[in-house]
Image (cartoon, grey):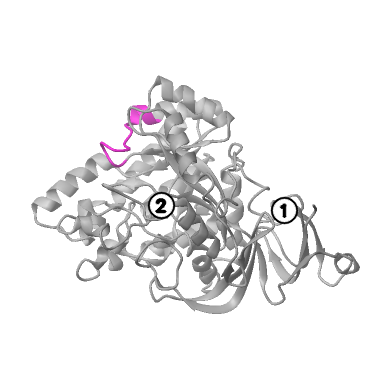
Amino acid sequence: MSSRTVIRGGLVITASDEIHADVLIEDGRIAALAASGTPAARAWSAEHVIDATGKYVIPGGVDAHTHMELPFGGTFASDTFETGTRAAAWGGTTTIVDFAVQSVGHTLRAGLDAWHAKAEGNCAIDYAFHMIVSDVNQETLKEMDLLVEEGVTSFKQFMAYPGVFYSDDGQILRAMQRSAENGGLIMMHAENGIAIDVLVEQALARGETDPRHHGEVRKALLEAEATHRAIKLAQVAGAPLYVVHVSAMEAVAELARARDEGLNVFGETCPQYLFLSTDNLAEPGFEGSKYVCSTPLRPREHQAKLWQGLRTNDLQVVSTDHCPFCFVGQKELGRGDFSKIPNGLPGVENRMDLLHQAVVDGHISRRRWIEIACATPARMFGMYPKKGTIAPGADADVVIYDPHAEQTVSAETHHMNVDYSAYEGKRITGRVETVLSRGEPVITEREYTGRAGHGAYIPRSTCQYLT
């Protein structure tokens, strides 16, 4: 049975174009675009017609950095794949790339299988996996080749969290050398975790236990130093590098320098670094714990350099690093010791709206909004043009976006499974109205019409963004 949908009268925005066009969807894919009102567009008939007059028609968002059900700090991220992907859809995101975790002493395969088991049959939108590599050895390196062949083409390593995810420079170099051969992309959490642990120990010994000290010990210079070191290791290995959740202006400068040298080095930032700051970490009582994440929030003056990096393409992607922990019972594990606060913020539902607000505020253009939130993450992680654009042959992951609607962000109205919002009370212009995933309505005029199990696993090709 063929199914057809026509979206009429909207402004279609992609990373490269803005055009008043009607969109024909057939059997879950974009079949054609035609200028609104032309004979070609008027000739289309379909069972379902969506009126997008006065609205934007944009590709579904691609959030390339989420952590559903992640075990961390003696607890688990509070969103499951079911609740997290539903919330993502409410926020206009139609594809997530989550992180499967290799535990020390176990294989990559065991970690990947565990994440497939968590996600399969539970997702409202499409999903893929990166692989966290915690234990570099000869068997792990061989497994990396096998995973690339089957569509898991990116591997995350940590210069932070000694004793948990940490890799030393030798392990990082070996994994990078393997990626240079097999086409994989190394993603790096760039903070000098060894030095940070010294500063944590010293702060606690001085009685500095409040959440704000989390930001003070994880110094911007230690993010910059690790970013520099990761770049040089990648250069030695001849491998591309993607630095996750860049928060500090000094780290942006390291990325810009490397890119000026022509290196395949890329940077991602997140809404929390663009809209929040150490002012939030310093909120009275224990409220600051809501904003504990790593890399940490920085002083407000870093924001301008992050926006600049996004405009100049020294930063290419905005992802969420969505890793929610409830304030009650989870963040509270760190009362009296900031180092025990689970690291992570909720945000998968807020990203597209916050970035539209950045368009309204003049930080970025509409096409750049789509580029950093949809097209580039799809290209960076081997899913373009199936994902990230509106073009014939692409999956019909489409959002009807009302650029004039006003909303106030609140935990009372969000759909993430967490008891607070990092953006509580923030007024935003723009709101998701309708979301299609492969042509199927997931959100219909602000009503959830999706289902767990609709989301399909997406094997990925290698990075399509290399110079």
Highlighted magenta segment, given as a residue range: 160-172
Is 92 on the left-hand or right-hand side of 28? left
Could you say where residue 168 lies in the image, as x and y percent from the top left?
Answer: 31, 31
Where residue 196 sits, quadrant-wise, is top left
In the picture of the structure, the residue carrying the numbered disc 2 is 246
**Residue at the image point whose x is 85% and y is 72% from the top:** 37
* Principal secondary structure, stretch drawn in magenta: loop
Could you say where residue 109 lies in the image, as x and y percent from the top left?
Answer: 46, 30
Q: Which mark is residue 28?
A: 1
Residue 10 vertical position relative to residue 194 in the rendered view, above or below: below
Could you say where residue 69 lies in the image, as x and y percent from the top left?
Answer: 40, 49
Q: As shown in the figure, which amino acid type bears the numbered disc 2?
A: Val
Any part of residue 185 in sight: yes
Q: Is residue 196 magenta?
A: no
Q: Nearer the viewer, residue 5 or 399?
A: 5
Q: As shown in the figure, which amino acid type bears the numbered disc 1?
A: Gly
In which quadrant of the rendered image does the C terminus lie?
top right
**Residue at the image point whose x is 54% and y is 54% from the top:** 452
Is 53 on the left-hand or right-hand side of 222? right
